[in-house]
Image (cartoon, rainbow, N blue to C red):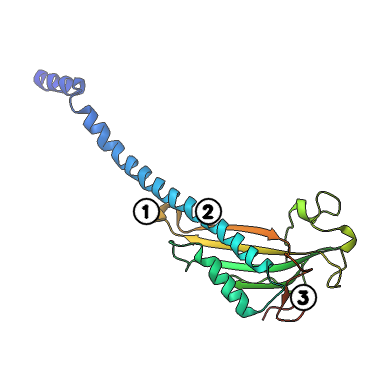
Amino acid sequence: MPRLFALSRRFLASTRAAIAIEFALVLPMLVLLLLATIDAGRAIAIYMKVRAAAYALDAMTAQYPSVQDDDLQLISGGAAKVLAPYPSGPTGLRISQVEITTAGPKVAWSFALNMTPYVYNTSNNIQVPTKLGGTTTPNNACDPTTYTAGNAPPKGCYLSLAEVQYTYTPLFVQFITGPITLSDSIWMAPRNTLCVQYNNAGCYSPST
């Protein structure tokens, strides 16, 4: 029995290989942290691509005086190319024209790929940024005297809203986070016209 106690004391007092044991305990956490850092870096890179795609979608649309579905298909395809070298399959795009009326925003038309277009001629609970939707300077996108009750050219305040979302699936830590939706949106005014007409039907047109 004394011998057993002596061995126990020696075992408890021994510090040999303690560092190796501690490293073995910490190693899985270090590996997980490394993999999470890689996934986070990819997510940030893709999010920057999503922002660039939203800008491209809005900027290209705003240059047109009139668009049709074929035009918007090409524009959306071009915007999706911005996401290269990442796959564009998980991408949703939506471009909408919104009129800021005296009663608030109204969707004049909306086109979407892998997303649901907004309902025509309603607000769709869209929140116009404060610095665009106000009625007094500097928080107004248009001269307040041009605001109408809706769809009354040659007056009106029209803006285009581009939205892009991307479903990112992490390479290593998806079992922890699952797929992550990265999204961004941007507002712009038409470049040289009152509004961007859709399907040759004027500033307002139901989605087709």
Of callouts 1 and 2, which one flags the residue occurring earlier in the amino acid sequence?
2
In three-dimensional space, the C-alpha distance between marks 2 and 3, rounded to whole angstroms, equals 32 Å
Q: Is residue 45 left or right of residue 30?
A: right
The image quadrant that residue 170 belongs to is bottom left
Which amino acid type corresponds to the residue marked 2 in the rendered image?
A: Met
Q: Nearer the viewer, residue 175 or 202?
A: 202
Give the left or right position of residue 191, taking residue 33 as reference: right
Q: Amino acid at mark 3?
A: Tyr
Q: Position of residue 135 (x, y in %)?
A: 85, 54
Q: Position of residue 159 (x, y in %)?
A: 74, 63
Residue 18's place in the image compared with 99, above or below, is: above
Q: Residues within 10 Å of mark 2 (few under 14, many from 20)?
A: some
At a point 74% along the width and 78% down the height, the residue shown is 205
Instruction: Identify the residue shown where x is 59% and y is 70%.
Output: 115
Residue 194: percent from left, percent from top: 79, 68
> Quadrant of the image for the N terminus?
top left
Q: Secondary structure at mark 2?
A: helix
SS at circle 1:
loop
Q: Is residue 8 left or right of residue 183?
A: left
Residue 143 x %, y %: 86, 58
Residue pictured at 44% horizontal, 59% vertical: 169
User: In the figure, 127 relative to 68: above or below?
Assistant: above
Q: Which class describes the residues within 10 Å of circle 3: few (<14), some (14-19), or many (20+)?
A: many
Amino acid type, callout 1: Phe
Q: Which mark is residue 172?
A: 1
If the image is split into quadrants, where does the C terminus sit?
bottom right
The residue at which mark 2 appears reads as 48
- SS class of the residue under badge 3? loop
Nearer the observer: mark 3 or 1; the answer is 3
Q: Which residue is mark 3?
A: 204
Q: Earlier in the sequence, mark 2 or mark 3?
A: 2
